[in-house]
Structure formats: C-alpha cells, structure tokens
Amino acid sequence: MTSISTRNSILAVVPEVTQNLLRVPQSAADYVPLQDDLSIETNNDEVENLEITASIGKAPPIVGGENPSVSLSFYLKGSGVEGQAPQWNEIAKSFFGTQTTEGTQRVTAASSTTSIVKLTSASSLVSQGYGMLIKDPINGYRVRVVHSVVTNDITPSFNLPAAPGTAVGLGKPVFWSPANSGHQSLSLLWYGGNGGVLQAVAGNLVNDFSFSATANDSVNATAGFEGLSAFINPIEITAATSYIDWTDDTGTLAAAISAKWYKDPHEVAEALQTAMNAAGGETFTVSYSDTTGKFTILCTGTLLSLLWNTGTNAANSIGTKIGFLVAANDTGTGATTGYPSDNVIDIDAPHTPTFDATQPNIAKNQEIMIGDQTDYACFNASEVSVSGTNTVRKLEDICSESGRNGAQVNEREFEITVTAVLNKYDVKQFARYRNGSTIRFQCTIGAKSGGNWVAGTVCYAYAPTCKISSLSISDDDGLVSLSMTMKPFPSAGSGEFYLGQL
C-alpha cells in the first residue's frame, strides 16, 4: 500500500469558460494556499427504490444526480501590490459577481473637506464600494470607501478627522461588488500529495463567503462551494487525442472514443474497450490497474500490434493520454499477453504555484467603524464576523448526464456580528436598534508601517446600509459585554456589501 501525504498538496481555483466544463490551471497564479480543513464531498442524490422484493429488507437505493460540495479556509490578506488582486480573488469574484480593478491612482484636488473628498478626475470605476487609501503625509493615512459620488466629489463612508490636502494619492483598489447575475463558475482541482491523487469538482458557485477576526488572532476567511460534477484522477480526451489504430488477426482497424472529461481512468478503459469491440475483429479487453496506475490492452487471437506511430490516425492518437509512448508502435507481444502502458497516469499539478508573499493579518491595530457618516471613531470590538450566503439554484435537466445542466445564484444575504466590552453609560447601539436606524459598517485590516497603512496589504469591507437585527448584553468573563448582529440591505439600486483590497 502506498499512502499519500497531504502536506504538499496543492489546490487550483480556475474560472470556467463554460459552466461545468472542467478547466485545468492555466498559470502558476491559478492556485490558493491551503489550510488543513479542505473538504471535498463527491455527493450524489439518493433516490429511494420502492420495489417490493421477497424480503422485508428494502431494495437498494438508486444513485441520482450529482451534488458535490467543497469547503476551505484562507487568510484574508492583500497581494502586496496595489492594483493587483490577491490569490483568493476568483473566489470573491464568483461569490459577489463583479470585480473592479483600478489601474490608475486617483489624486485629490484642492478644497477637500472632512466630509467631501474632491478628485482631480473620477472615472466610471469610482462608484460605491471603491476603496480609497488616502495617503495624507500630514494627517496620516486613512482608509475610506466611496459611499456616493457626484462628478468628482466623493462622499466617504465615514468622515475624516482632518481634510486631506491637494494631490494626495488614493491608491489602486481591487474590489468586489454584489451582482444580480453573471456569477463566475469555477473548477476546483485538488492535487493531493501533488502526484498522489487528483480530485476535481466542476461547475462550482460560491454559496458561502465569510471572514472573522478575534483580537490578537489571525483574520481568517472561509468559502463554501456547490458544484455540478465530481472527478477523481480525471482524463481529458479531445478530438486530437481520441483515436487508436491497431492490427489484429482480422486486419488493420481503428476506433475512437468521445471527446470529453472522463470521471476516472476506469471510465476511459470502459469507453475504449467498447469502441474497439464495436470496430469488429477480435474481442478486446482494456483495463486500468488501481495498483500500478497503468492501462493494459489485450485481445483474443494471436496477433496484436498497436499502431501509435504509423496508424492512419496517429496524429490524433489516444496513446499519450493513457500512458503509452507513441514514438514507435507496440509490436511483438501476443494478443492475449497484451500491452501495458509505459507510464502511469499524470496527476501532478502542471505548475509550481506562486503565492502572495504577504503575511497573514493579525486582528490588532486595525479599524472598525459603525454608525453614520460623522461617527468615525474606531468601534473597539473584541470580535467581528461577516457572513455572506448565496442561494444556488441547480437547473434540473433530464437530458443531462448528471441530471443537471447548470446552476445560478438567485438570492443572497449578509450578516455582521460584533462583540465589544460595554462602556458605562453607552446606550447608543440600543437606541439605534430600538429606532430601526440605518447605519454603516466598515472594517479595515492590513499591515502598518510608522502608523500608516501599507499599500497592497489592506483589505476592507463596507456595508453602506444596515439595520441592527439583534442586540444582547451579557457577562463575558467578569465584564459586561455587548453583542449585536447587523443585516446589510440594498438601497436605491446600490449594493449592500462590498469587499476590497488597497
């Protein structure tokens, strides 16, 4: 038995061109650093078999449509480069629906105030959710998010303690906005042990995107996915890799199998055996060994030559896909002895991943603001968590191989929970809860140097319109603690929650 270590496993997250068509990583940037809680479930619906047999035992269930799911964790951290999306950007893009990348640093014009940031020019990219790293050399760097914009005048998420000067840079944000449609589907490929096993799920949409911060601990995020198709050690056959030519006792023949992603090597062997037997001639057996990782082709009769190099369809040979060397034909072995493939199946990652070099953010010296535009003091929370949920609707299809031909997001919801030590006389949050007041929420995390935020490391979350949905006061290890939950909601066609990097 050969066991597989998980310590050098690799996960690729690849945007699909066609939903549910598995897509392999295209570059060294298509990977996300793993934590040890990755879970891939290759679930199928279980259909009850109602037949009554000559027993009081129930008939065996029937395997129904595919329902794979994936969950994983990652650090919520920046790429380290302004205007360059972090490693987890495809996950955020799939969840939110829209990604915006700013390639030009906007700068302030004269006459900005604490409540209005004036720009020299604002493109169409500058909209609600657009983050600003206000690099004020006199008053210190501040992070604010665009709440609204009129021409070149920006109303920030929260006021500034001092008006920024002229020609102050605002950074290059990458940010994700909630969309009503067009959510990018993803292929997830886990290279377990990087050569031990390849487990893949296609057609994924993100149904959960959450992050949490506890004082003096790392800021961690989790994502959950609902997929459409699952594979283990899959093999892709294309029109250019689908043929086999051979000579047996009855003559020279050829066969081809369908171009598609095969679920596992056994499915390829079954398809190839069926195709070769359908071509006439001898009776063929094509098998895959779970011990050696190789294919074997044999048949009845006395003669068998596999014409990898000289066959009519040699240019479109399946040989390399199933481990055969195609520079020469396979000849000289009896038909019943057959030919084993020269190489094992290829389940290594095609690249050495390049990961963001930034360190995980620790929940200290960060900033949380809750209230209205004028309430810009840091809310001294000990814990904050943000949970976003998409409801994914599977599109049932009798004609589809998996019973489903796609999926789409048709509902979303966000929830923010904060916990803080309650200060004496402070009932402001209760008054907001009691009155059903609409409030704002901003969370900013990242590295600082000399007291200023470091560009490329900052992540921000912004909810422009929230209501407090629950509030409680309790004893937290001898201190009075306030916990409250806020529900963001869309207003006047704008999004209810934004996430970004600066």
Image (tube, rainbow, N blue to C red):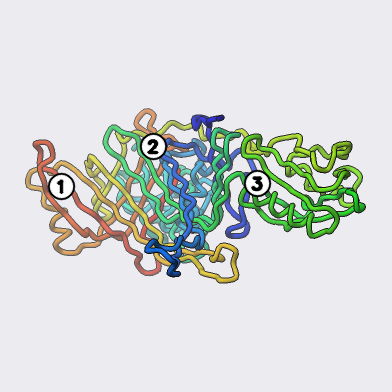
Q: Which residue is mark 3?
A: 265
Q: Position of residue 429 (x, y in %)?
A: 16, 53
Check the picture and name the quadrant holding the N terminus: top right
Q: Is residue 481 left or right of residue 12?
A: left
Of residue 120 and residue 428, the one placed in the foreground of this image is: 428
From what the image shows, is residue 204 above or below residue 308? below
Of marks 3 and 2, which one's residue comes earlier in the chain?
A: 3
Of residue 53 and residue 1, the one placed in the foreground of this image is: 53
- Seen from this angle, which residue lies furthest front? 54
Of marks 1 and 2, which one's residue comes earlier in the chain?
A: 2
**How busy is the neighbourhood of tag 3: few (under 14 within 10 Å), some, or many (20 plus)?**
many
From what the image shows, is residue 198 above or below residue 259? above
Look at discs 3 and 1 and give the one toward the viewer: 3
Look at discs 3 and 2 and give the one toward the viewer: 3
- What's the residue at 37%, 49% (across, down)? 210
**How busy is the neighbourhood of tag 1: few (under 14 within 10 Å), some, or many (20 plus)?**
many
Quadrant hosting residue 415: bottom left
Q: Which residue is mark 1?
A: 482
Q: Which residue is mark 2?
A: 446
**SS class, disc 2:** loop
Q: Is there CB contact under 8 Å for labels 3 and 1?
A: no
Q: Is there CB contact under 8 Å for labels 3 and 2?
A: no
